[in-house]
């Protein structure tokens, strides 16, 4: 079931909340069980066959986690063995469903074999509920997981706002909230703030992300078909996808936080204007924040982090990002994407060390703008591998972006340029028939959305008087857009919500659903 679907908005959500708060008056435990059951139903709407897999994973991890928490001294050999067993089973399940076909196809290509394997349908959200439960097992082994109420644990894993596409949750940040009496009482402020956040997210998804998406898909499809893309074609497609992914993921994150806040449960922030980052490390502190936290705490630091010298730190960074890339998808293009970000981080760390040794001061305002622009350019280049269906398709798009295939404009554009057209031809610009309308609308979307990305406050900054998430970064310098329960904001949010609802003719999946 999709957050941006009619059945979710007008059937599932109202019924779920109404019954939840009614039950909460009499029995918090019964209300929690209802919310867990509703979350399982929400998951099963996609494919009921995989509900059994989800429940089996929950039961297995609960029992292992309970055993770890009650299994003797922290750090004992028995605990380490049980932890490794639990992690291995989780990763084995993930590897089978997500990577079996990828590895077999790779072996067939490498050795010229034709070994067949039944096509495996990837269970929705398996990466997220697997990582969430691995984190739980590690926390249990460390003695950090304290509560083991089974209904609350089922709710922790299946909680519908996060189940399909994150955020990746920690047991210790969610379980106390499920135990609070206030969570089960209807609260007008929670409903109002939650609906406001949800309206912002819905608008981002169905109006902005889905609006710019049609200008990215044809370009990448043409690249896969072997078409040579010109400079403006390639950049138009790459920037359209860069903005589509931004508003899609930002919209989902807002909707998840808003939905959860209606219930009175704060989810961790997962998105914080990442394209405003001045370096690649800052980008990863802003993009998919809970995944970055997971990779740092459960992979990078256990590998040694930065404790064993610069060379080992660079190896750890690269290994972490390569595995992070592979987590996003079973394909070599995702591995390359992760490797590029690993390389970016290595370069950033080396450059930061040089700056520190030389005693260079913090960059000026102009220097920060240049840093943001350079970081954004690096991210756009990497997104090409993330989006492309094949390595050759990604290289085709990058060839066009670098100008290797020439610079071309639609003839319809040239007819409106007057005396400029002959000069453009002299410098090597060619004019091709057709495509004028798509070209204009592609770049109009880009020119409209880029200022929103770089110049406007994000949702948590707008809502900073009523922080709906469990962490709230420092507010930006923008002071004009601060939400308040007043008439002007009510009208504005009603307009955004109406625009979102009117765009629900054909609900589209969130891009992170495929991971």
Image (tube, rainbow, N blue to C red):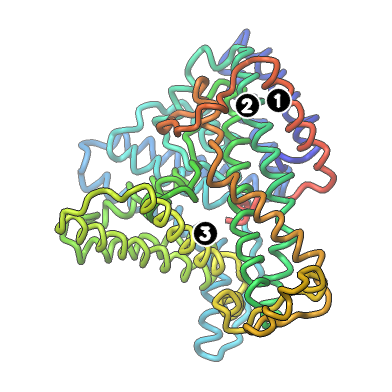
Q: Nearer the viewer, residue 297 or 239?
A: 239
Front residue of this view, candidates 101 and 279: 279
Q: Secondary structure at mark 1?
A: helix
Residue at image coords 76%, 59%: 441
If the image is split into quadrants, where does the N terminus sit?
Answer: top right
Spot occupied by residue 140 in the image (x, y as percentages of width and height):
34, 37
Please provide percent x and percent y for residue 374.
43, 61
Mark 2 vs 1, N-terminal side: 1
Q: CA distance from mark 3 to mark 2?
A: 29 Å
Residue hosting label 2 = 35
Marks 1 and 3: CB-CB under 8 Å?
no
Rendered image quadrant of residue 7: top right
Identify whether 322 is placed above or below 90. below
Q: Which residue is mark 1?
A: 16
Q: Residue at x 57, y 32 (%)?
A: 257
Q: Earlier in the sequence, mark 3 or mark 2?
A: 2
Q: Secondary structure at mark 3?
A: helix
User: Which residue lies most toward the bottom here?
Assistant: 112
Question: Percent position (x, y) of residue 443?
Answer: 69, 60
In this picture, is 487 found above or below 403?
above
Lower position in the chain sequence, tag 1 or tag 3: 1
In the picture, measured across the screen, residue 369 lies left or right of residue 505, that is: left
Q: CA distance from mark 2 to mark 1?
A: 7 Å
Cβ–Cβ under 8 Å for marks 2 and 1 = yes
Which quadrant does the C terminus fall into? Answer: bottom right
Q: Which mark is residue 328?
A: 3
Label 3 Cα crowd, 10 Å radius (few <14 / some 14-19 / many 20+):
some
> Is residue 226 visible from the viewing direction of this image?
no
């Amino acid at each position: 079931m999709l957050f941006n679907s009619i059945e979710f908005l007008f059937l599932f959500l109202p019924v779920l909340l109404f019954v939840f708060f009614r039950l909460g008056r009499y029995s918090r435990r019964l209300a929690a069980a209802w919310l867990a059951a509703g979350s399982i139903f929400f998951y099963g709407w996609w494919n009921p066959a995989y509900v059994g897999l989800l429940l089996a994973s929950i039961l297995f991890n609960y029992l292992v986690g309970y055993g770890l928490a009650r299994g003797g001294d922290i750090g004992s050999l028995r605990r380490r063995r049980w932890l490794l067993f639990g992690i291995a089973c989780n990763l084995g399940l993930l590897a089978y469903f997500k990577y079996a076909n990828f590895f077999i196809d790779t072996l067939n290509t490498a050795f010229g074999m034709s070994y067949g394997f039944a096509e495996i349908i990837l269970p929705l959200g398996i990466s997220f509920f697997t990582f969430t439960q691995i984190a739980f097992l590690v926390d249990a082994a460390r003695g950090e997981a304290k509560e083991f109420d089974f209904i609350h644990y089922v709710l922790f894993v299946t909680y519908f706002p996060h189940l399909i596409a994150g955020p990746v949750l920690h047991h210790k940040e969610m379980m106390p909230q499920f135990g609070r009496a206030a969570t089960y009482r209807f609260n007008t402020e929670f409903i109002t703030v939650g609906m406001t956040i949800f309206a912002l997210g819905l608008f981002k998804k169905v109006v902005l992300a889905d609006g710019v998406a049609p200008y990215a898909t044809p370009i990448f499809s043409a690249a896969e078909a072997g078409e040579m893309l010109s400079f403006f074609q390639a950049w138009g497609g790459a920037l359209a996808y860069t903005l589509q992914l931004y508003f899609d993921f930002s919209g989902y994150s807002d909707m998840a936080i808003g939905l959860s806040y209606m219930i009175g449960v704060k989810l961790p922030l997962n998105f914080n204007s990442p394209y405003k980052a001045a370096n690649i490390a800052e980008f990863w502190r802003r993009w998919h924040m809970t995944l970055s936290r997971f990779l740092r705490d459960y992979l990078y630091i256990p590998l040694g982090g930065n404790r064993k010298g610069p060379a080992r730190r660079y190896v750890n960074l690269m290994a972490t990002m390569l595995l992070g890339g592979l987590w996003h998808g079973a394909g070599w293009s995702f591995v390359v994407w992760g490797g590029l970000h690993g390389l970016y981080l290595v370069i950033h760390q080396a450059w930061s060390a040089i700056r520190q040794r030389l005693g260079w001061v913090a960059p000026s305002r102009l220097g920060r703008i240049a840093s943001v622009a350079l970081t954004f350019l690096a991210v756009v280049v990497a997104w090409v591998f993330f989006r492309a269906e094949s390595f050759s398709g990604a290289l085709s798009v990058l060839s066009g972006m670098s100008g290797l295939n020439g610079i071309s404009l639609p003839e319809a554009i040239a007819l409106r340029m007057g005396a400029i057209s002959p000069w453009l031809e002299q410098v090597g610009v060619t004019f091709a028939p057709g495509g004028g309308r798509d070209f204009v609308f592609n770049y109009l979307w880009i020119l409209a959305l880029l200022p929103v990305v770089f110049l406007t406050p994000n949702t948590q900054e707008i809502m900073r008087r009523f922080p709906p998430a469990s962490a709230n970064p420092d507010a930006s310098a923008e002071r004009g857009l601060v939400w308040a329960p007043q008439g002007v904001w009510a009208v504005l949010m009603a307009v955004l919500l109406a625009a979102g609802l009117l765009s629900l003719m054909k609900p589209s999946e969130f891009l992170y659903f495929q991971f």
